[in-house]
Image (tube, grey):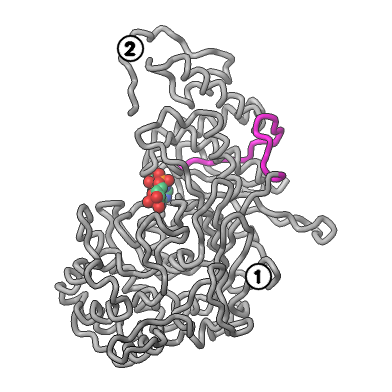
């Protein structure tokens, strides 16, 4: 079976760099009813960025991105007392733009967004410009970003569909188109996208919040974010990258959801590593994005954990925020072909830009980097960790992971041999900001990957103890020949066991599973222990 293809030759307990798993193929780029191509796919060797594709028309409705270039994007000009096209104002302003200091950018952004004059602050940008080296970089690059933004009518002449809720749809665009769209986000030109949080089903896209300081935000992190963005624009404005990127919203149909209790799927291979990261060591694999249901989470605001960091070092991911509606429980977003432009150090409050990164990941036959991200948003259990073992919630997480991992098979008659599903590179999904239990999330992701016929590599993010326990448990489960259904039953039993234990100290999930594998029950001789209050 395809699922046994990858056999990483590693001894448990010994962390070494993973071999690259570039054998997998990602779904093709082919325009169809379910796949909008905004560009002609390029060949990996093509020197020029791919040309735009499709019929240039303007559509101004809620099923498409409302483009800054649309004639329907209008504003009331108080001076002339008339309604005018905003794109003309944008063109006029950006063509003449001088950038010497933060106030120049502030003035331009507010010109396009006069309503936000008293609401938006530019304190992070001001602090950034206080540093001479950074200011110089901005002085060099801002005029070039303006020039790139103004190429929007030429580079993105066709309507961009919204990847809307409950609908499978793919969208392919060129890296050049992505760069142009992001240049527009930089100047905050996207209309109707500044609604306050909670009022829109789309994430924010304009970069105003990257320029702002909020109470509780850490200045050095805000600066590191700007460093990443500035570095990206320095790169793409000196040479437009030649590849393409596909964004696929995957909504699971009820028929495709596995019957977890009764699943006879064999468990696939799972290798655990205490060291290494998803992005550095998951090359050529499908890599987890520990997402927010609003894709990108706090990347344009305060956040700087796994998802946000990934979006900052691979800024093309930010484009997903332009058209991806809030993810529903049975949905995921799968992004193929993004490039890494920056390096980083630290995490969260210690996150810092660590210089330029040259991505050498090979491209596939459509010009996409062989990097695939699977964005799945876990449930939030911070402060209510004890509920996560509830079978209903367990199923929600299983279905969510499966919505990311499931691969549609080509019809049997067209396939001479089935392509190999890429290995899933993941880790403590939902267990940082969202407060989940890594024991549970590791097993759930393994079950979902198994039903999707994928192997899994798991990075415990420096947690050596977890790595050892997890790898040993995986080994024991494999030895017993458990199926996905058997493991699901053990999870249900653990949930019951926790209910029985109530506030008393309980075995961890992996301890419990190991005891079950040996045919034992956890001992109850610690009944007098202190309450274990996880709230
Ligand atoms: N590679 C491997 N493991 C990692 C990496 C990495 N690069 N980075 C972090 N981890 P978190 P969540 C591990 O908190 O709990 C964002 O705001 C590390 O152990 O990012 O699902 C999103 O937008 C870390 O504690 O994911 C959502 O709003 C754990 O993965 C929210 O956070 C979880 O990382 C999602 O929170």
- Tell which of 482 and 328 is nearer to you: 328
Report the residue at 70% width, 70% height from top. Answer: 32
Image height of 150 relative to 110, above or below: below
Image height of 143 relative to 492, above or below: below
* Total marks placed: 2
Among numbered discs 2 and 1, the one appearing first in the sequence: 1
**Highlighted magenta segment, given as a residue range:** 255-274
Quadrant (top left, top right, bottom left, bottom right) of the C terminus? top left
The label number, if any, that marks residue 529 in the structure image: 2
Report the residue at 34% width, 79% height from top. Answer: 234
Disc 2 + disc 1, Cβ < 8 Å: no
Instruction: Identify the residue position indicated by label 1 in the image.
Output: 29
Image height of 178 relative to 5, above or below: below
Q: Is residue 362 in view from this perspective?
A: no
Label 2 element class:
loop
Q: Quadrant of residue 260?
A: top right
- Tell which of 336 and 260 is nearer to you: 260
């Amino acid at each position: 079976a395809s699922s046994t293809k990858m056999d990483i030759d590693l001894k448990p307990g010994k962390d070494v760099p993973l071999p690259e798993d570039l054998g997998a193929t990602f779904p093709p780029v082919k325009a169809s009813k379910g796949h909008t191509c905004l560009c002609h796919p390029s060949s990996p060797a093509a020197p020029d960025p791919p040309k735009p594709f499709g019929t240039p028309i303007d559509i101004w409705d809620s099923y498409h991105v409302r483009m800054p270039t649309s004639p329907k994007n209008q504003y009331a000009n108080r001076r002339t007392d008339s309604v005018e096209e905003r794109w003309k104002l944008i063109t006029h302003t950006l063509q003449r733009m001088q950038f010497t200091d933060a106030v120049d950018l502030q003035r331009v952004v507010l010109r396009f967004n006069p309503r936000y004059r008293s609401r938006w602050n530019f304190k992070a940008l001001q602090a950034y410009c206080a540093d001479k080296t950074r200011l110089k970089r901005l002085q060099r690059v801002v005029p070039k970003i303006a020039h790139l933004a103004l190429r929007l009518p030429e580079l993105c002449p066709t309507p961009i569909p919204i990847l809307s809720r409950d609908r499978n749809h793919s969208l392919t665009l060129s890296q050049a188109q992505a760069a142009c769209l992001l240049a527009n986000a930089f100047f905050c030109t996207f209309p109707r996208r500044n609604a306050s949080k909670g009022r829109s089903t789309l994430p924010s896209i304009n970069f105003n919040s990257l320029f702002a300081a909020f109470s509780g935000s850490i200045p050095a992190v805000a600066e590191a974010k700007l460093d990443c963005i500035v570095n990206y624009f320095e790169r793409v404005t000196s040479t437009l990258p030649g590849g393409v990127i596909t964004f696929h919203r995957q909504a699971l149909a009820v028929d495709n959801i596995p019957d977890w209790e009764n699943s006879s799927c064999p468990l696939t291979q799972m290798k655990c590593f205490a060291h290494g990261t998803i992005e550095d060591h998951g090359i050529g694999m499908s890599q987890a994005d520990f997402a927010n249901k609003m894709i990108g989470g706090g990347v344009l605001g305060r956040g700087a954990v796994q998802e946000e960091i990934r979006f900052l070092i691979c800024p093309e991911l930010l484009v997903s925020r332009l058209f991806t509606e809030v993810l529903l429980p049975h949905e995921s977003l799968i992004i193929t072909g993004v490039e890494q432009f920056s390096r980083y150090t630290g995490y969260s409050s210690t996150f810092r830009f660590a210089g330029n990164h040259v991505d050498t990941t090979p491209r596939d036959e459509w010009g996409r980097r062989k990097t695939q991200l699977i964005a799945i948003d876990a449930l939030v259990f911070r402060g209510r960790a004890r509920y996560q073992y509830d079978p209903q919630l367990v199923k929600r997480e299983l279905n969510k992971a499966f919505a990311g991992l499931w691969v549609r098979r080509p019809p049997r008659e067209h396939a001479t041999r089935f392509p190999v599903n890429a290995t899933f590179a993941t880790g403590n999904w939902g267990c940082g900001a969202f407060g989940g239990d890594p024991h549970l999330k590791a097993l759930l992701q393994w079950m979902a990957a198994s039903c999707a016929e994928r192997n899994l590599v798991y990075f415990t993010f420096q947690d050596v103890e977890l790595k050892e326990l997890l790898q040993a448990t995986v080994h024991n489960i494999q030895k017993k020949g458990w199926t996905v259904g058997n493991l699901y039953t053990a999870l249900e039993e653990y949930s019951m066991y926790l209910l029985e234990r109530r506030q008393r100290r309980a075995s961890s999930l992996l301890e419990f599973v190991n005891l079950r594998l040996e045919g034992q029950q956890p001992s109850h001789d610690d009944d007098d222990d202190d309450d274990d209050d996880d709230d």
